[in-house]
Amino acid sequence: MRLPLASRLETAVVLTQRGLVRPVRPDRLLQMALAFRRWGVSVAAAYAVNAISRADQAAIVDDDGTFTYAEIERRTNALANELARIGLGEHDRLAILCRNELAFVESIVAAAKLGADALPLNTSFAAEELKKVVAREKPPLLIHDAEFDSIVSSARLGPSITRVVASGEEQSGTDTLDALIERGQDEPPKGPAEEGRTVILTSGTTGTPKGARLARPDGLEPLAQLLKVVPIHAGSAYLIPAPLFHAHGYGQLVLGASLGCTVVLPRRFDPEHTLALIERHRVESLAAVPLMLKRIMDLPPATRRGYDTSSLNAVVCSGSSLDPGLARSFMDEFGPVIYNLYGSTEMAWATIASPQDLLQAPGTVGRPPPHTRVTILGDDGKPLPPGQTGRIFVGHEMLFEGYTDGRPGRERIDGMLTAGDLGHIDTDGRLFVDTREDDMIISGGENLYPSEIEDALRAHPQVADVAVVGAKDPDFGERPVAFVVPTPGSGLEAAEIDRFAREKLARFKVPRDVVIIDELPRNALGKVLRRELHPPTHEGRRQVG
């Protein structure tokens, strides 16, 4: 998409303000131009360019050490050459089953240098799930951490896939990543005829995840549109505990690399360790999912305040719905730092809620950036006025290219893709997501939005977590059922929730059943796995332990 001159100038201004555009020696500028020509606008180009302009700066800090941009450039050249020697070529898929660490980064960069598709795999997969995804995607190579060896072996992937152990001891007949790098030539491989793609698996809250081919940007404009709102600066420290195998963590890793940031990658998320890393590395930006923010706020106040987090400037949050109360309490503690992105694997990010948006209009997911269309359509496919709930459609250049299994993608209208959500836009142009289309409950002819009921129940001081789902009902068609997690030691009972709900909600919105449980089932992004919540088989408010 060719943008008007004014937009291209604005892109240059924003990138200069964030420190990405800066004076460079002519010889290095030529080398950077050649890197872009060889690798295109890809993650390979990001690391190659920074290896020229920031050679000795720390690029990745993981649990095992610190690695500069120059080191990663040399290592990924060697890895790409050796992967090519053992059979990985353009348009092949490189499966990656690694936690947040250097091995993940080097795998995706090496794949990009060969024009291969990177296929990050969910580190929570069971053997059967892994087997299904690999059978569908058919990668000839799998790079995995040693900790997943038993799962990979149990999946019985067959002789058509070569395994490489990313970390740990070399096993009989299986190479390690370091062994490949040591054998490989560190000269840059020949650039591919066409850039590879990244295939991100959908979060799979409703079944086996699908593979979505991410779009390839034509230039730096999408980056500038994000940075115009979110204050992430080139060369700063960026902490990413959000899982890299999901679109949010992956996207922020690529963004951090594009900005020449020092990206800090903990293998596992721990709330107190996160605060310690912010203090240790003077972290300015943090990529997280809402559940991580909740875990931080669940720490005792004395623990939270025992770390110096004054360097924190932006918390880029996405992946699941952000509770307005959590957003406010987090910013009361850490300052106006949350920038909430609304999007999905298929449509990338569509809106950004700034700290001001989150405080002034609790529950909003923000406004679309320039050159992004967000429209609310009714059942007739026509736009709805502000305040009316309808289907959310998004249009911009980053819509995904399709599913890898060949199944039809989501519905498109006038170049816009359905988000699969229902929502409305207020008179100030802010978007609110009311519910997933599949989650809406129609009870007695009334449309009930689970998020509205959940927000009301969450206001109870003894409710730690809550999810509302629909259950079949012989009289009303469906009825709302609330699954409630009490605060520890509160002794909260279903009858109290029923009383509270009647005070806060219209009668037809009050849950017919209240189920008390210890914990809601969630995926790695914190999304509630509603398919695992099983309502009572008969009506009647009751408590289930």
Image (spheres, grey):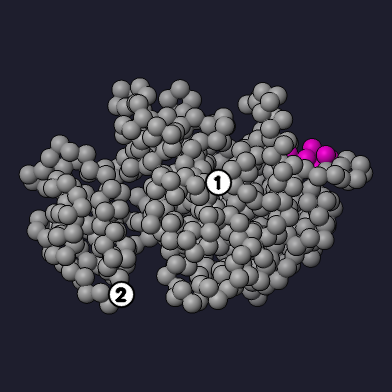
Q: Residues within 10 Å of mark 1 (few under 14, many from 20)?
A: many
Q: CA distance from mark 1 to mark 2?
A: 40 Å
Report x, y in % for residue 143.
Answer: 61, 60
- Front residue of this view, candidates 519 and 4: 4
- Asked if residue 232 shows in the view, the reply is yes
Does the magenta portion include 516?
A: no
- Does the residue at mark 1 contact the one at mark 2 (Cβ under 8 Å)? no
Q: Position of residue 292 (x, y in %)?
A: 47, 63
Q: Mark 1 falls on what kind of element?
A: strand
Q: Which residues are magenta?
A: 33-41
Q: Is residue 49 left or right of residue 339?
A: right
Relative height, residue 22 to residue 531 (above, below):
above
The relative height of residue 242 versus residue 232 in the rendered view (above or below) is below
Left or right: 407, with 163 as reference point: left
Identify which residue, 541 or 331, lies in the foreground.
Answer: 331
Circle 2: residue type: Pro
Residue 423's spot in the image, x, y percent?
Answer: 35, 38
Residue 488's tag is 2
Q: Height in image: 144 above or below 48?
A: below
Residue at 64% across, 63% down? 311
Residue at the (30%, 71%) spot, across then down: 487
Name the disc covering residue 199, or none: 1
Judge whether residue 37 is colored magenta. yes
What x and y, as percent, mark residue 282? 67, 65
Residue type, numbered disc 1: Val
Q: Nearer the viewer, residue 350 or 163?
A: 350
Which image quadrant for residue 439? top left
Label 2, secondary structure: give it: loop
